[in-house]
Structures are given as structure tokens and as C-alpha cells.
Image: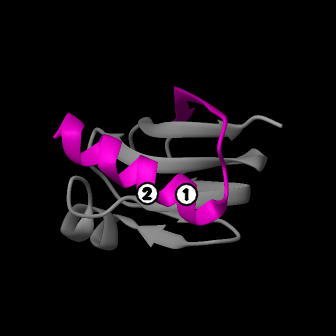
Amino acid sequence: MEGILNHFFENRLKELGIEKHHFTWKKEVVAPSGMIIVPATNEYLYLYDVSPKGAFQIESDTEIVNDDKFYTDSAPYRLFELKGDIVIRNRSEVEQSFSFFRIIPEN
């Protein structure tokens, strides 16, 4: 799967015109029935894992993802590109962790 992801990011960054970037991971934890806002104006986040599985909704400038869409269409078949102020709503009764690939363009 690593080769598939490298190929995806390489192509996507070319499409966005990004030549230099910093690649890392980001994890956000949301309390039961809680909500957080993750600022990602100058970066791209790609959701790749939610643990434990449960109901949620994420809204950003580029995508709206809920648990049905994520569990049906997620990596390695599809990554959800999120940018801007990202609103994460945990609609379950347990704490959830949301894991992202994080790309920060460098000037």
C-alpha cells in the first residue's frame, strides 16, 4: 500500500503545483458526542483512519465525509482531501481518534 500512497501524493502535488512540501501525520481526538475545529488553511489533510469505528461527520472547504462514506470508500481506494477549517463531529458515545496524512507546502 505504501507504493500506492506515494504515487497518489506525487501526482496530487503535481496537480496542485506544489514542488516542495513537508509530509507528516496528524492525530485528533474527539470526545464522545463532541466537536472540534482543526485549522488547515495552508496545508492538506487526508483522512486515513478512525478508531474505534463509530458515527462521525467531517466538513471542510473541499469535502464532507461521514462514517458511511469513509468506511465504504476509504484508503487505499480513496483518500479524502480536507483543507480550510475542518469541523469534526463525533456522533458516537465513545472517544474517537482521527488520523490524517498531513502535507504542508513549503515556499
Q: Between residues 72 and 76, which one lies in front from this camera angle?
A: 76
Residue 67 is left or right of residue 28, and the answer is left
Give x and y (percent) for residue 10. Answer: 43, 48
Residue 61's place in the image compared with 103, above or below, is: below
Residues at marks 1 and 2, CA–CA distance in whole angstroms? 5 Å
- Residue 89 visible, this orientation: yes
Residue 62 x, y percent position in the rendering: 63, 72
Q: Which percent across, then down, holds residue 98?
A: 45, 40
| Image-based side of 55 in relation to 59, left or right | left
Closer to us: 39 or 68:
39
Per the rendering, the mark at residue 14 is 1
Q: Are marks 1 and 2 in contact (CB under 8 Å)?
A: yes
| Residue 5 part of the magenta-drawn span | yes
- Which residue has dot 2 on it? 11
Q: Amino acid at mark 1?
A: Lys
Q: Label 2 is placed on what type of residue? A: Asn
Looking at the image, the residue that sits furthest to the left is 1
Q: Quadrant of the N terminus?
A: top left
Identify which residue is drawn at 63% across, 49% down.
44
- Lateral position of residue 104 relative to residue 88, left or right: right
Number of numbered discs present?
2
